[in-house]
Amino acid sequence: MRIIGGELRGKKLSSPKDESVRPTTDRVKESMFNLIAGEIGEDTVVYDLFSGSGGLGIEALSRGARKAFFCDRSRNSYDLTRKNLRDCRLESRSACVFGDYRKAVDQFDEPADLVFMDPPYNLDLWKPCSDLLLEKEKLAEGALLVMEHGERQLLTDLDPRLELIKERKYGLIMVSIYRYRDNTEEQ
């Protein structure tokens, strides 16, 4: 695993030592960031939920995001994310929370402009997680939610304020990108 773009381009990240974490491959990560090109700026706040190694949030920081919040309920993943942040000298631009996403988002003190959601596929957490972010008002207007999921997992019944804007298939993996629009002003 390596950082693909930005100020830390080419830097290698530590990888999990076992199969319990499924890091996003460099190919999928590069394609994912190509899909959101131009969406990361100096004021961008990122959430990397189910962070694993922290690779997606670290990639966003390398590309100029101001701050990234990470969380994982696996002690090994949490420790790995913190190690990669330390190795990349990104501690001052990040916060890492050990625990389930439901408790962690309460500790994130700024709303997200960009959210990476790559939970274990078998837990089917995309809807509950996105619903929680909306309920807790943790999304800035226009925020992007980048959801990685299995090709056969349909992301259905998501809140209508989340509009699917892009979707791509990479082998058995799907990447679906939603934009948050607060429709209350239009009603």
Image (spheres, rainbow, N blue to C red):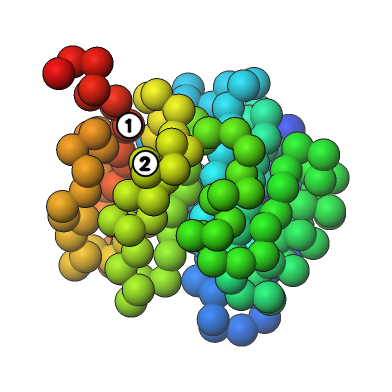
The percent coordinates of residue 155 (x first, y second) are: 21, 56
Q: Compute the Cα span from label 2 to label 1.
A: 9 Å
Three-letter amino acid code of the residue under disc 1: Tyr
Disc assigned to residue 180: 1
Q: Quadrant of residue 187?
A: top left
SS type, badge 1? strand
137 over 57 or under it: above or below: above
Q: Quadrant of residue 5?
A: top right
Among numbered discs 2 and 1, the one appearing first in the sequence: 2
Q: Residue at 55% across / 59% down in the picture?
A: 103
31 over 84 or under it: above or below: above
78 relative position to 103: left or right: right
Q: Residue at 40% across / 24% down in the picture?
A: 141
How many numbered marks are there?
2
The percent coordinates of residue 186 (x first, y second) are: 18, 15
Q: Note whether residue 13 is visible.
A: no
If the image is split into quadrants, where does the N terminus sit? bottom right
Q: Nearer the viewer, residue 162 or 148?
A: 162
SS type, badge 2? helix
120 relative position to 178: left or right: right
Q: Residue at 26% across / 37% down in the picture?
A: 162
Disc assigned to residue 134: 2
The percent coordinates of residue 89 (x first, y second) are: 84, 45
23 over 104 or under it: above or below: below
User: Is the Cβ of the residue at disc 2 closer than 8 Å to that at disc 1?
Assistant: yes
